Image: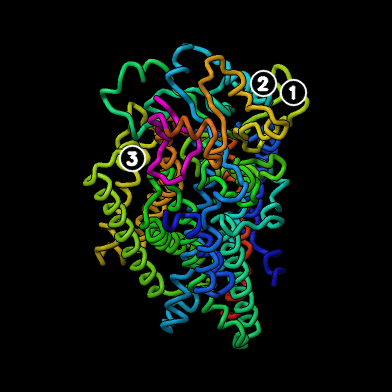
Amino acid sequence: MGINRRSFLKMAGLASISGLGIKGFTKAFGSESETTKDKKQKLALVIDMRKCREEQGCRDCILACHKVHNVPEIENPKHEVKWIWKENFEHAFPSQNHKYVSDKVKSAPSIVLCNHCDNPPCVEVCPTQATFKRESDGIVMMDFHRCIGCRYCMVACPYGARSFNWEEAKPHIKEINPTFPVRAKGVVEKCNLCAERIAKNELPACVEACKEKAILFGDLNDPDSEIRHVLSTNDTIRRKPHLSTMPNVYYIM
Amino acid sequence: MIEYALSGTKKYWTLIFSLIVIIGIGFTAYLYQLREGLGITGMSRDVSWGLYIAQFTFLVGVAASAVMVVLPYYLHNYKAFGKMTILGEFLAVSSVVMCGLFIFVDIGQPSRILNTLLYPSPRSVFFWDFISLGGYFLLNLVIGWVSLESERKSVPPPSWIKPLIYLSIPWAISIHTVTAFIYSGLGARSFWFTAIMAPRFLASAFAAGPALLILLTFIVRKVSTFDPGKEAIQTLAKIVTYAIIINVFFILLELFTAFYSGIEEHTQHFEYLFFGLHGKSALVPFMWVSIILAITAIILLVNPRTRKKEGILILACIAVFVSIWIEKGMGLVVTGFIPSPLEKITEYMPTAPEIAITLGVYGIGFLVLSILYKIVITIRNNEAC
């Protein structure tokens, strides 16, 4: 694509800081070139709702994720913290919704989580770079210890994928996993695509937990990967594609 | 000069102590928020900004409006504003103090606030907002203080202050433009995703700010011999008139684009704001009060006969201020979240501690303002003697 928001802001920033209008422009374009040829990964998920629907009411992926990441279970919906959860079609895909959506699609809610966007608006707005897009694999990460809790990222995220700790989390966690931090109140958190498990060559917890094998994890930069094969042989959709955030979570409905 | 603020009449000290009581209540509520977390406010997962950030947004406008007295005086040599500029500049100073405090009380981890300096992030609009607000605060404080100091000594102000004054004019526009950019650059929030956000912010600022300044001037005139003059007040009133009309015009432009295109993402927020959506209508009564006040104010202000009557002018200014406070200090920020990007409706109402903290911050702002104005009044009174 031509000039996206990120490169535009980069250009504006460079141009205004350096005062070198034209030089700033060429610099910005140069750095935004395609990086597919180097070894950088682009991690993504494909959620196969055909398989997911088979197990009505199953919450295995949610429970597995929330358990390993010490996600508190808070009753009050206003204070809820969620990394992966279920959302009815009209809420997960509001712009694709219509009156005659098939009964099949309506029969079960979709699994939703952070999309680890190519152009993450949350990263753009963060005033401390506490949330950032990891260069090596494209995961949108959070530094829980740097976050000041301004919640600008929550305002910018079009997917409701970010949660704020409105209250102390600890009393709401049944069993604390000592290998993962428990968040302090007053910080934002979200799905980290199991960066801590990927580092140990393990699959994301949600992928591993799914009995139906409905969640596929892989590297889009590897043309021979299974995920690329699935994407090229199935019709897939993404959430809110018109916003040009370029989500990396794909859905087979 | 600060010593002038330390002696005063009984009325002055009553004001100071009542403000300190309000600040004390707010501070206690803040300690409670600090212990329990921001969950004690009405904010939620879906409505992640509320009263605090809305007040911040509104007060950036009040701060920026000082330019409406500075510009005519310094660029057009409009003498009638001579006595008024200092009041505008000090109103800006106290407004920026409140802006900073409203950001501070809204932050979940206030002890980490300096991370914004340790890890400066030029891609974030917040970064530019800190710079523009900080700069504006210093500019107005220095300009106001230095001009007042030379006034006290009956000498002309130093020549180096002029460039700073000229700089403060575009800077005032910048603070409110950057504040609008916090909202208008987010694809996720269709209600704010409009290029007219910055002009709207400026129009509402130039209505509400000068309206407040007129009201403050009347108070100052009542408690001291200091009189900025009828002409200055009437000119400010005309500025308020134009600005409130332009503000209403801009809102009508928004309504046209939303409803003629009929794009639901845009219409549903306005529907929620003015009529309620799916039976949820917490903001509706407030918005209609805002509309009625704006229309009443325009009628009273456009007609020169009513505008020139001071009693009516005071009422019109109160109407303008309250109308824009509702529109910007509540409607604009909260409605951006309703419905949410997932098209769910979670309503928002501030809680008692949240309101107490808000009043506490206003208390600090008015304390700063009272002290600064007291210094101005004392110096001007001495001159008069």
Front residue of B165 and B311: B165
Could you say where residue B116 lies in the image, as x and y percent from the top left? 66, 54
Q: Give the magenta part as a residue range.
A: A233-253
Label 2 secondary element? helix
Q: Amino acid at mark 1?
A: Asn
Give the residue pinned by disc 3.
Answer: B265
Could you say where residue B129 lies in the image, as x and y percent from the top left? 56, 59
Q: Is residue B95 left or right of residue B289?
A: right
Label 3 secondary element? helix
Q: Answer whether labels 2 and 3 touch (C-beta < 8 Å).
A: no
Label 1 marks a residue whose chain is A
Q: Are marks 1 and 3 on the same chain?
A: no
Mark 3 Cα-neighbour bin, 10 Å: few <14, some 14–19, many ≥20: some
Location of residue B147 with respect to B38 vertically, above or below: below
Q: Is residue A75 left or right of residue B110?
A: left
Q: Answer whether labels 1 and 3 touch (C-beta < 8 Å).
A: no
Give the residue pinned by disc 1.
Answer: A177
Asked whether residue A234 is drawn in magenta, I would say: yes
